Amino acid sequence: MLSHGQGCYVEDVDGKRYLDLLAGIAVNTLGHGHPALVDAVTRQTAQLVHVSNFFTTTPQVELAEALLRVAGAPAGSGVFFANSGTEAIEAAVKLSRRTGRGTVIAAEGAFHGRSTGALALTWKAAYREPFEPLIGRVVHVPFNDEDALREAVAAVGEDLAAVLLEPVQGEGGVVPSTPAYLALARELTTAAGALLILDEIQSGMGRTGRWFAYQARGVVPDAITLAKGLAGGVPIGALVTFGPTATGLLTAGQHGSTFGGNPLACAAGLAVVATIEADGLLEHAREMGEHLAHGIFALRHPMVAGVRGEGLLRAVVLAEPVAAQVMALARQAGFIVNAVAPDALRLAPPLVIEAHELDTFVAALPGLLDAAAGR
């Protein structure tokens, strides 16, 4: 049971300290107790915490404008605020329905949430099957397989509403999409008159060393979904639509949220955006991600089969399916990591982490791997 945190460390109720290399699953963008976030939430709490969606507030408008700016969204774009990634996906599903078509193509290995609409898009059978039949028609295709995507789009034909993909699959094992794959998705959806929707819930807000992972791939989507790191730990989600055509699909009253876009969450989001910009955290995330990957490769440990990912969203790929054991041993040693797959450890630390902190984990990793493998 955790009691408090500071910077990149958390402490449990027994006084044990851990280096948080997961950041609440890519949520705590600025770590724990960051002064900018604490100050923003404190000031906003004293001013205004919540109003109904009959009104807008200054933090809500300013955060929407900031997101459109860092996304490079064209005139006529829009932002709908929700409370979570799953809610942002539900808004994206409704956006796709407004095309008048019914089929969405998603990827094998994808995770998009646990509500009924999001579950239909999520690949893992253990999540989906207890609640089937789910809503909508969803076709899953192998991730990064260009031929499979091309064939699926052709097979669906005129009923294709959207292709919905993660630029970097998080729960699927931190698997980046190739630029060619996303470019093909953009080409095919444009030709079919369908939407390209990118799930940046885990990969967005600087996590990969860019504001959004799609920006490294040279494509412009019709919409993106955001959450997790957007407000540094305060619950929020968002659907960002690009241009007047996509934005105009959902009109006033067709979707809504009581708490979505509340001034407290939006003030926290503004603090995150401002701090990323002021402290150069995009470049820092790229540098620290490369530092981490280089350090792990330099170990030349037989249990390390590779390191994949971008920025500070990384997976240590193991030669044996012992990730769960390594995760437990790491916890005992004072490191929080995640067994995202039987043979992969996910690392998604706060963007403020420093090289010397990452080095402590790299130094401990060989012993953890040896112990997990029974050596």
Image (cartoon, rainbow, N blue to C red):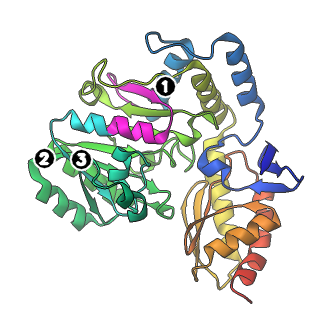
Estimate the x, y position of residue 171 in percent, counting from the top left.
49, 59
| Amino acid at pointer 2 | Asp
Q: Which residue is mark 2?
A: 159
Q: Is residue 283 left or right of residue 148?
A: right
Image: magenta residue range: 73-92
Q: Nearer the viewer, mark 1 or mark 3?
A: 3
Q: Residue at x 43, y 24 (%)?
A: 257
**Observer-nearest residue: 23 or 116?**
116
Q: Is residue 318 visible?
A: yes
Estimate the x, y position of residue 90 in percent, counting from the top left.
36, 38
Q: Which residue is mark 3?
A: 136
Estimate the x, y position of residue 97 in percent, counting from the top left.
22, 37
**Observer-nearest residue: 294 or 60?**
60
Q: Earlier in the sequence, mark 1 or mark 2?
A: 2
Q: Earlier in the sequence, mark 3 or mark 2?
A: 3
Q: Earlier in the sequence, mark 1 or mark 3?
A: 3
Q: Residue at x 36, y 54 (%)?
A: 131
Q: CA distance from mark 1 to mark 3?
A: 25 Å
Q: Nearer the viewer, mark 3 or mark 2?
A: 3
Q: Nearer the viewer, mark 1 or mark 2?
A: 1
Picture layout, residue 91 above or below residue 254: below
Which element type, helix, strand or loop, lies under badge 3?
loop
Q: Residue at x 74, y 21 (%)?
A: 42
Q: Which mark is residue 260?
A: 1
Q: CA distance from mark 3 to mark 2?
A: 12 Å
| Amino acid at pointer 1 | Gly
